[in-house]
Amino acid sequence: MRVHALHGWEVSIARAREIQLSLAKRVVTENEVINPRLVAGIDISSPDAQGIASGAVVVLRYPELSIVEVEVAEDKIAFPYIPGLLSFRESPLILAACEKLCNVPDLVLIDGQGIAHPRRVGLASHVGLFLDLPTIGCAKSILCGRHRPVGEEAGSHAELLDNGELIGAALRTKSGVKPIYVSVGHKIDLASALQWVIKCCRGYRLPEPARLAHLAAAGRLPLEGV
């Protein structure tokens, strides 16, 4: 799978923020997803004691959500942990895993923020630009913005606003569990992003592509029959 090299990764913190502001202008917030055949999930593990982490991408056939391909890349994390700059820490490993793919997904769900980010280009947007594919941010916590209470029924959502700007939504994917935070990554609009996240849920808090990518990154995804 082709990855577009938009910039290098060995940059200063100040330069990383400049790059984010530049990339934010290139994010497309219009829907380009039509009848996806393959849907992917992306996640990365926490570094171990030696600083080694695993980036994983799992490609699923839609609508069955059966596994088509799993790729994992391992390496040492180089960029420091700085809130708002996690894409510079995590993207290199994620993209290394994506480069191994034989199958190109039509839609990618990423455990992280899309435009629900102070500079409007979180991990899902950053990776989406490098892959030039529709991506959705499916984060487990808020980085910025506020929302009203979310209904308890699965599928309920509340707009996530930052200084009056709509940047995403808090979405209840399962009754009785905390909502996740969905935002546009690239080449999709928010309404479509919410629709596809719900369609990809299979009874867990996280949509199935992101859930399986989390397991793959942790080395806990059974691969028999893949």
Image: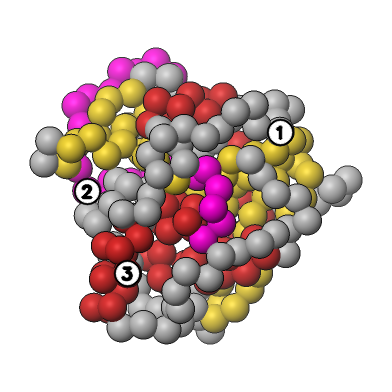
Counting other residues with Cα less than 10 Å from the Cα at mark 1, is it few (<14), some (14-19), or many (20 or more)? some
Secondary structure under tag 3 reads helix
Compare marks 1 and 3 and give the one earlier in the sequence: 3
Which residue type does callout 2 highlight?
A: Cys
Whole-percent x, y for residue 147 in the image: 20, 32
Counting other residues with Cα less than 10 Å from the Cα at mark 2, is it few (<14), some (14-19), or many (20 or more)? some
Compare marks 3 and 2 and give the one earlier in the sequence: 3
Which residue type does callout 3 highlight?
A: Ile
* Residue 25 in magenta stretch: no
Secondary structure under tag 1 reads loop
The residue carrying mark 3 is 19
The residue carrying mark 2 is 144
Whole-percent x, y for residue 185 in the image: 42, 46
The residue carrying mark 1 is 37
91 w.r.t. 177: above or below:
below
Q: Residue at x 88, y 45 (%)?
A: 225
Which residue type does callout 1 highlight?
A: Arg
- In magenta, the rendered stretch is 130-154
Label 1, label 3: how many angstroms apart (C-alpha)? 33 Å
Q: Main secondary structure of the magenta part?
A: loop
Whole-percent x, y for residue 4 in the image: 56, 65
